[in-house]
Image (cartoon, grey):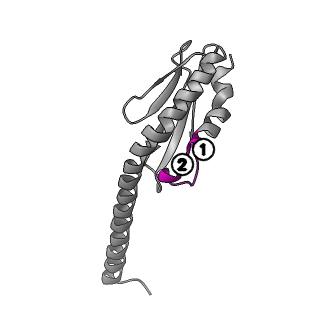
Amino acid sequence: MSLELAQIRRRVQTRLADVKRAAAARRDRADAAGRAYGTFLSAVAIPTFSAVAQSLSAEGYPFTVTTPGRAVRMTSDRSRLTYVEIGLDTSGPEPQIIAEVGWERGSRVFTDERPVAEGTPVDAITDEHVLARLLELLPELVER
């Protein structure tokens, strides 16, 4: 027994409606995360990055903090290829804050991306989350 064209069409229409609803919900989550991210950036990420950069500089590892676009970046004063940057990623099903780290060893350049606090909503990420991720990435930033 084969499916009739009318049955197929109804199922396709139902699935399309589901896809449209899911896309609208994802856009709403991304918009809300974008608003929360602005607050997070100014109140949590930038102060934490600045404190870590000052601490590293005091230990002989000079870093500079910048805010390119809607991100915060800490770059080694010794190599512009050694950095860590936090930004908002809304490309997946749930928005999340991502830490991108770049470093070089000899002539080789590496990069990696990791969530700052996987599964945690943007408005619930604290300075403790950011500091923990920065401390985890410290070997990539200071090893030569």
Helix, strand or loop under label 2: loop
Magenta run includes residue 121: yes
Nearer to the camera, 22 or 5? 22
Q: Does the CB distance between marks 2 and 1 fall below 8 Å?
A: yes
Q: Which residues are magenta?
A: 116-130
Where 100 sits versus 25, above or below? Answer: above
Amino acid carrying label 2: it is Ile
Which residue has dot 1 on it? 129
Where 11 sits versus 101, above or below? Answer: below
* Residue displayed at 56% across by 28% down: 51
Where 124 sits versus 54, above or below? Answer: below
* Residue 106 visible in this rendered orientation of the protein: yes
As drawn, is 14 to the left or to the right of 132? left
Q: Which mark is residue 59?
A: none
* Residue 110 visible in this rendered orientation of the protein: no
Nearer to the camera, 131 or 136? 131
Alpha carbon of mark 2 to alpha carbon of mark 1: how far? 6 Å
Which residue has dot 2 on it? 125
The quadrant in which the C terminus is found is top right
Classify 10 Å Cα crowding around label 1: few (below 14), some (14-19), many (20 and above). some
The quadrant in which the N terminus is found is bottom left
Q: How many marks?
A: 2
**What is the residue that sits farthest to the bottom in this orientation?**
1
* Residue displayed at 61% across by 34% down: 134
- Which x, y percent locates residue 124? 52, 53
- Which x, y percent locates residue 80? 51, 17
Magenta run includes residue 138: no
- Which x, y percent locates residue 117? 58, 47
